[in-house]
Amino acid sequence: MYRKVTAFLEKWKKDKYRKPLIVQGARQVGKTYSILEFGKDNYSDVAYFNFQTSPDLNAAFEESIDPKDLLPQLSRLNGQKITENTLVVFDEIQLCERALTSLKYFAENAKNYHVIAAGSLLGVAVNRKKYAFPVGKVDRYTMYPMDLEEYLYVKGEEELAGEIRSSYDNNKALPKVLHSSALKLYREYLAIGGMPEVVSRFVETNDTVQVKALLDTLLMDYLSDMSKYQESANEIKKTRLVYETLPVQLSKKNTRFQYKVVKSGGRAAEYENAIEWLVCSNLFSRVYCCEQIKKPLDNYKNIDNFKIYFSDTGLLCAQKGLRAEDVFFMEKELTDFKGGLTENYVQTQLIRNGLKPYFWTNGKGTKEVDFVADLNGSIIPIEVKSGTHVKTGSLDEYTRFYKPEYAVRMSEKNFGFENNVKSVPLYAAFCIE
C-alpha cells in the first residue's frame, strides 16, 4: 500500500542531523504498518516494542533511561541483539512517560541508533499528564489518512494520478474521458475516505456495507478514547457533543463553528476544552478566519471565528449516516451537506501537503473565500465549489482588494487558466503544495 510517509522516512534515515523520530496521528491511519514496512525494507533488523500490548515493558524504563543501560534490557526482552543497523520502534509511546523522555538521551548519547516512536493520542496524553517532553531532541511527523493521490495508487490508477499532476502544472484540460473517470473516483473517495483498512477492504470487495461497518466501528473506538483519556465525566459529555454535531455544523450554509449548534445558549468557555481535545487527538482540524491578508497569516487570525473539519471524509459521511451510493452520485438530498463535505475534503488534502490554511471574510460577513494559504511564498486564495457552477462575488472582491499573484478556483470543471484564475478540478486538490 503506497504511502507518502515512506519518502519522508527514507530522507530521515539518511539525514546526518537525524534525531529520534516521533510519528503521531489519529488511530488507524497506518502509522505502525508504514514504519514496519519501512524498517523491513531499509534495515537488517527491526526491534518492535508496543506499550499497549506489553504493559511489562514499562519496567525496563523505570531504573534508567540512558541508552547504554536500556538497550541491553530491550535486547533481552525481545530476544534479539539491537545494533546500529536495527530500527528500534516504540509503539503507543504515550502510555509510558519515561520512554518518551528517553528519546532525549538517544539523541544525546546514542546518535548512531535509529529510533522511531509512534503515538495515537500523544497530543492528548502530553497535555493531560506531566510529561518531560524531549523538546528540541526529536524530529516529528504527523500522519493522516490517505489522500486522494494515495487512494488512486491503491486503486491501480498511478497513470491517471500522473496525468492529473501534469495537467495541474500546465493548466491543460484533461481529456473528457479521463476527467469523468477522475470525478467518479473523487466522489468514491469522499464516501470511502482514506483510512487504510477501509480503503483496502473496499478495493478487495467493492462492498460498501462492509465499508460502513468498519467506519462505524472506528467512530465508536474514538468515542471510547474520549472516556479513556479524559478524567471528568462532564468533559467527556461535552467532547462527545461537539464530535457528534460536527456534521450538522457542516450542513449549514455558513459552515463556521457555532456553539449554539452544540447546545442552545452554548458558549466558548463551556466547549473550548472539548474542541482542543479533538484537535489534539487529530480527529478534528481547525481553520481560523483572517480578516487581513498579511504575512504571517497567523498574526491576523481571529481566534473566535473558526471552522472545524473531520480528519477524514469517510468518517464524516459515516457520522452523518449517509449511504456511500448517495455520495457516489451526489444525490439531490445532499444539497445542504454537499458544500460542507467538499470544503472538508479540500481542507484535508491541504493539510496533508503541509499547508496551514485559513479562510477570509470581508469583515461585514457578506463575502467569504473558503481558504487562503501560503503557496511558495505567495498568499493565494482558494475558492471551493461542489459542482460546476462557479460564479461568485467573493473571490472577485478578494482579488480586487489584495491583487494576489493568481487565484485558485476548485470545482468539478476541468483544468484551465483565465483572468488570472487557475481552475483546478476537485480531484486535483492533492497537487496544491
Image (spheres, helix red, strand yellow):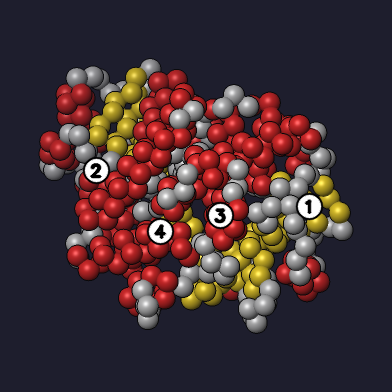
- First in sequence, mark 3 or 4: give its number: 4
Residue positioned most to the front: 332
- First in sequence, mark 2 or 4: give its number: 2
Residue positioned most to the right: 419
- First in sequence, mark 4 or 1: give its number: 4
Report the mark closest to the observer, 2 or 4: 4
Report the mark closest to the observer, 2 or 3: 3
- First in sequence, mark 3 or 1: give its number: 3
Residue under pointer 3: 333
Real-space Cα separation, disc 3 to disc 1, in angstroms: 30 Å
**Figure check: 211 above or below 303:** above
x and y percentages locating residue 251 in the rendered image: 52, 62
Residue positioned most to the top: 44
Real-space Cα separation, disc 2 to disc 4, in angstroms: 24 Å
Query: Can you see residue 186?
Result: yes
Real-space Cα separation, disc 2 to disc 1, in angstroms: 48 Å
x and y percentages locating residue 34 in the rendered image: 42, 31
Residue in the foreground of this view, choosing between 63 and 351: 351
Q: In this view, does 216 lie to the left or right of 410?
A: left
Report the mark closest to the observer, 2 or 1: 1
Circle 2: residue type:
Ala
Residue under pointer 2: 99
x and y percentages locating residue 129 in the rendered image: 23, 58
Classify mark 2: helix, strand or loop: helix
Q: In this view, does 364 lie to the left or right of 23?
A: right
Real-space Cα separation, disc 2 to disc 3, in angstroms: 50 Å
Residue under pointer 4: 279
